[in-house]
Image (tube, rainbow, N blue to C red):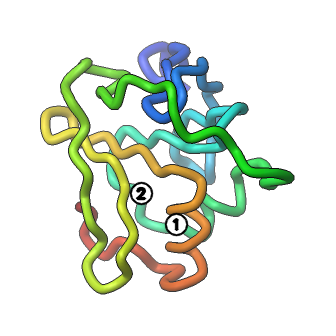
Amino acid sequence: MTAYRSIQLECPGCGHMMEATSVGRRSVHACPRCLGMWSDAPFQDASRLAAAARPMEEEAPVSGGRASCPRCDEPLAFHAIPGVRVFVHWCSVCRGTFFPRRALEELARLDPGWPPGGP
């Protein structure tokens, strides 16, 4: 993992510090508090990302974050996944994506191959 990818990031969902990890060959950041995950690029296999996330034992907190990109500090936009009524938070500047835990679970359940081309 490069130094850029291993820098600790603030979770856009709850404000807690995320932990750098890998899913396959991809570097991601996982939040130990709200269980959301940040990918620096659209993630091609939501089922692998969801499987790598910590199990959800109770309702995870979903507030307290700044809703801004942890890389470039630009505002994150809600991005609706067509046809599945699931929202992720996407940075239009650096193209990073924040997957709230519930979105990960729903995407993996509905379409393990999401997204074909990313947001």
> At x 50% / y 73%, what residue is drawn?
107
The image quadrant of residue 30 is top right
CB under 8 Å between discs 2 and 1 = yes
Q: Amino acid at mark 1?
A: Ala
> At x 43% / y 42%, what residue is drawn?
39
SS assignment at label 2: loop
In the figure, 73 relative to 25: above or below? above
Where residue 35 sits: x, y (%)?
66, 43
Figure disc tally: 2
Horizontal placement of 82 versus 115: left or right? left
> At x 70% / y 32%, what residue is drawn?
33
> At x 21% / y 45%, what residue is drawn?
77
In the figure, 78 relative to 91: above or below? below
Q: Which mark is residue 46?
A: 1
Q: CA distance from mark 2 to mark 1?
A: 7 Å
Farthest left residue in view? 93
Farthest right residue in view? 57
The image quadrant of residue 52 is bottom right
Q: Which mark is residue 43?
A: 2
The quarter of the image holding the N terminus is: top right
Q: Nearer the viewer, residue 24 or 48?
A: 48
Assess disc 2: are there few (<14), some (14-19) or many (≥20) residues with their C-alpha within 10 Å of its C-alpha: many
SS assignment at label 1: helix
Q: Nearer the viewer, residue 38 or 88?
A: 88
Where residue 57 sits: x, y (%)?
86, 53
Where residue 38 sits: x, y (%)?
47, 39
Assess disc 1: are there few (<14), some (14-19) or many (≥20) residues with their C-alpha within 10 Å of its C-alpha: many
Q: Amino acid at mark 2?
A: Phe
The quarter of the image holding the C terminus is: bottom left
In the figure, 85 relative to 34: above or below? below
Horizontal placement of 32 versus 106: left or right? right
